[in-house]
Amino acid sequence: MFLFVLKISFLLTVASVTGKYVESDDELPELEWPKKYTFEATKVSLTSALVENIKHWRSTTKSRTDYNDGAVKKIFLKAKKRSKKLPFGVKYEIHPETSENNENELFCVRTKGIRSDLVTPENILPDLSNYDFEYVGTDYLDMGEVEKFAYEEEGSKKYLWAYLDRKNGSWIPVRVEELGYNEWLENLNEHVVLDIINFETQFDYSVFSVKKYDCTDADTDEEETNIDESILDSENDDDVEVAFNKFKKEYNRHYATEDEHNMRMNIFQNNMRKVQEHNSKKSSFKLTLNKFSDRTRAEKRKSKGLIRRKAGEKGTHPFPYDKKKVTELADSLPSEFDLRLLGYISPVRDQEGCGSCWTFGTTSAVEGALARSNGGRLLRLANQALVDCAWGIDNMTTLYPIKGFTNVTPFSVEALKIAVVNHGPLSVSIDVGSTELLHSYNGGIFYDPGCKPKSLDHEVTLVGYGEVDGDSYWIVKNSWGRDWGIDGYFHISTRDHACGLTTEPTYVVM
């Protein structure tokens, strides 16, 4: 699967190098999609390493998208004119759930549109009425010669490859590439490629029927759905209650007693103050309310779990670059480097309340080392295996022995960049608990003067680095789920060895 990711990256590079470009699109008709079409596609996220297969149907008023061989289905129906029953449209999500009594039981949830949020057909392909694509020229993909189009706006770039069906004069899309950038810092945080096959303009409208499903209405509230938290006052009890009710609904929070409810709301209000105060000042990063916003300090400790190595402990293999060699190589390093784009990084996971961050940082480092050693084939290893081994359980069915590990020269940004490029990803330790500010991180280059470089309590994975306006930062994979930070990642400044990231970096030797 992840060889496919590497293949995509390679093809994109080849296309940009070998592409044959023309100077005019005068002979080409306007780029537009048929009013009715269906296709299959593979969607690859080069940043999060997720791969999905998709089947899509669309007309001017309806759409359906099946994900991962139809395991999840989403159907969007636009409102009919003068419809009293569903004046704002309706959408359905059909998905399996497993309980104690049933395995993979299908559930259908119906969500009715509201006046401020009308339901319209979903766009898997770029909506050409919203994006003014410019013709770039003729390009070459595996299938042969195609035409390439490009669109750029603040925060994103889109590329589209298609060919003209001369028989009926319609465009047939074959690839879409989208790149998203951090809204504050303009560094890449999303890179998605959609490869399209079997594009057809005829299909049976029965694909939009939900009659065979027992659909139930979703629990929605128009007023709560449209709350703008930025205008709520953290010192106003009524505003705090509104924000907290929205938070409880979003994160499915249920508290055992009224005393616990009040305690949680007080914690939430304190975090609300912290977020609003920080975001009102000039800063290189932003904070947000998230799943940690009602958690106690003791509960947040479970999101970490690092046990420091013994003082003076050395790696089994020495770092192969002395100070002179590091200085020589530093000038030849790329200004930006991201192992996710090479297919060496598996999707972000969530340790939840396990306190086993060390297994996630270690597993990601070993996965990357394996990928480097076996030609790019990324294998997902089990964190639970490390937990089991820590308790002396010898029941592993498949083992991947390593030769050892190397400790990178501490407190050296240049040495660490060399290690990332030539040996990464790396397992690194940081200080989170001193201020707990990272728990509320939402984007930008994190820099917390309250961090202590030697009070390390959390293990994460270093996957690359970047630079914006002279401000260099590390790209770090966390283990707090994709609903935290930048799709599960955070960017942290290289200044002052922020939060101790350069204190004990380690990479695996295969």
Image (cartoon, rainbow, N blue to C red):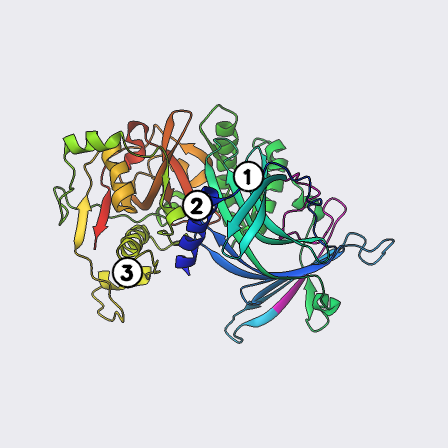
From the viewer's perspective, tell me whether residue 6 is left or right of residue 152: left
Residue at image x 53%, y 57%? 143
Q: Which tag is nearer the camera, tag 3 or tag 1?
A: 1
Check disc 3 and report its element: helix, strand or loop.
Answer: helix
- Say which residue label 3 marks: 387
- Say which residue label 2 marks: 13
Dominant SS of magenta comes to loop
**What's the distance in space between the residues labelled 3 and 1, CA to CA?**
42 Å
From the viewer's perspective, tell me whether residue 362 is left or right of residue 97: left
Check disc 2 and report its element: helix, strand or loop.
Answer: helix
CA neighbours of label 1 inside 10 A, class few (<14), some (14 to 19), many (20+): some
Q: CB of mark 2 within 8 Å of CB of mark 3? A: no
**Which quarter shows the C terminus?**
bottom left
Q: Which tag is nearer the camera, tag 2 or tag 1?
A: 2
Tag 2: amino acid: Thr
Residue farthest toward the bottom in the current orientation of the protein: 101
- Say which residue label 1 marks: 157
**Which quarter shows the N terminus?**
bottom left
Observer-nearest residue: 241 or 84?
A: 84
Q: CB of mark 3 within 8 Å of CB of mark 1? A: no
Which residues lie in the magenta part? 107-133
First in residue order: circle 2 vs circle 3: 2
Observer-nearest residue: 437 or 500?
A: 500
Q: In the rendering, at what x and y percent does residue 344 appear?
A: 35, 51
Residue 238 magenta-drawn?
no
The reply to whether residue 172 is visible in this rendering is: yes
First in residue order: circle 2 vs circle 1: 2
